[in-house]
Image: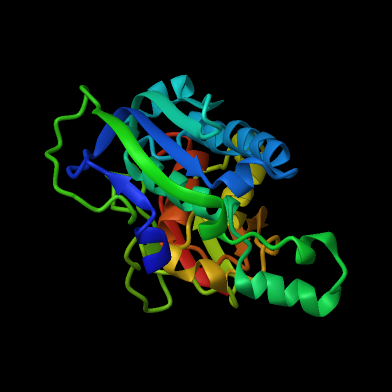
């Protein structure tokens, strides 16, 4: 992880449970950002993204693992504190602690314009407002504190991690099989954003669930939440990622273009649209 970000995150919670039922994060802003004309609009954007995208995906089963039936009770909230900072809380029956990893990455990306993206837009239109008002995380945020975490009482998996910044494997109901002579990537490996990813599925995708999760999932991917914080400034092509369903002979196929995210994101999407059906999933680059 980039040293700029690691110096800003603070927590006295060293042991990371596998599944949790509550967490609380606090973001301490710089005075310059709290007093800026953009602050209120930015806070509204944070609230919208949290509710419309992350909470929506959580309730469909994101990071739910074996507790998908309880996923609909997931609740995320943002509150403005008297000192102008914000508190972000999550309450669940059970969700994997990967959700905290996602939100830590999201906090950085929502308060930072990637250098590559800024240069890309600057080359197109130097006068654009977005180019003129580039955000730099360290100029906006003093610190992010993980204040509280409550382990899930339904899960007795032992505490084995201290890292709050990396995704860890889960016990997924479905585990995709890679073909083209490739071994399955590790959950933190990046998928190739220059090739089309084709997922062949033997069961029928619930189009209703797919349509519910499609845009929230794309928004999460575009936010940088499935990219390592060390690559934040290299994320220069937001908005290109696409996902859709096509008929592939006897099977349906899920297509992902310009993916470029960590493999865990694809596994989570597949487990959501599987909707607890049995079947096999094969992945290959086209």
Q: Quadrant of residue 182?
A: bottom left
Picture coordinates of residue 49, whole percent (x, y):
62, 39
Asked whether 231 or 271 is in front, the reply is: 231
The residue depicted at 36 percent of the width and 41 percent of the height is 145
Q: Residue at x 46, y 50 (%)?
A: 142
x then y, percent, for residue 46: 61, 39
* Residue at (42% x, 48% y) in the render: 143
Residue 159 in the figure: left or right of residue 145 = left
What residue is rendered at 47% in x and 41% in y? 28
The quadrant in which residue 210 appears is top right
Q: To which quarter of the image does residue 259 belong?
A: bottom right
Return the x and y of residue 18 as percentages of the image width and height. Answer: 23, 40
Q: Nearer the viewer, residue 6 or 284?
A: 6
Instruction: Using the image, determine if residue 155 lies above or below residue 106.
Output: above
- Where residue 35 appears, as percent x and y from the top left, is 66, 41
Q: Is residue 279 in sight in this rendering?
A: no
**The N terminus: image quadrant:** bottom left
Q: Is residue 180 left or right of residue 60?
A: left
Q: How many marks?
A: 0
Q: Is residue 255 left or right of residue 202?
A: right
- In this rendered view, identify the residue nearer to me: 16 or 112: 112
Task: Using the image, determine if residue 135 lies above or below residue 101.
Answer: below
Whether 239 is drawn above or below 33: the answer is below
Report whether 240 appears left or right of 281: right
Note whether residue 186 is visible: yes
């Amino acid at each position: 992880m980039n040293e700029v970000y690691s110096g800003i995150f603070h927590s006295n919670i060293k042991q990371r449970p596998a599944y949790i039922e509550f967490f609380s994060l606090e973001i301490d802003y710089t005075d310059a950002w709290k007093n800026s004309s953009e602050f209120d609009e930015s806070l509204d954007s944070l609230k919208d993204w949290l509710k419309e995208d992350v909470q929506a995906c959580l309730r469909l089963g994101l990071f739910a693992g074996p507790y998908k039936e309880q996923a609909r009770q997931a609740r995320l909230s943002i509150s403005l504190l008297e000192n102008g900072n914000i508190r972000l809380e999550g309450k669940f029956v059970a969700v994997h602690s990967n959700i905290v990893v996602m939100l830590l990455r999201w906090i950085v990306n929502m308060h930072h314009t990637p250098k590559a993206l800024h240069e890309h837009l600057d080359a197109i239109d130097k006068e654009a407002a977005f180019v003129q008002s580039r955000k730099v995380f360290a100029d906006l945020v003093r610190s992010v504190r993980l204040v509280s975490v409550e382990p899930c009482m339904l899960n007795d998996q032992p505490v084995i991690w201290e890292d709050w910044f990396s995704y860890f494997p889960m016990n997924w109901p479905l585990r995709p099989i890679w073909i083209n002579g490739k071994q399955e990537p590790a959950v933190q490996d990046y998928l190739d954003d220059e090739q089309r990813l084709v997922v062949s599925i033997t069961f029928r995708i619930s189009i209703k669930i797919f349509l519910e999760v499609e845009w929230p999932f794309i928004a999460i991917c575009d936010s940088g939440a499935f990219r390592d914080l060390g690559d934040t400034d290299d994320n220069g092509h937001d908005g290109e990622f696409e996902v859709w369903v096509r008929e592939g002979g006897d099977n349906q196929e899920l297509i992902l273009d310009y993916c470029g995210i960590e493999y865990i994101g694809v596994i989570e999407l597949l487990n959501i649209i599987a909707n607890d059906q049995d079947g096999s999933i094969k992945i290959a680059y086209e």
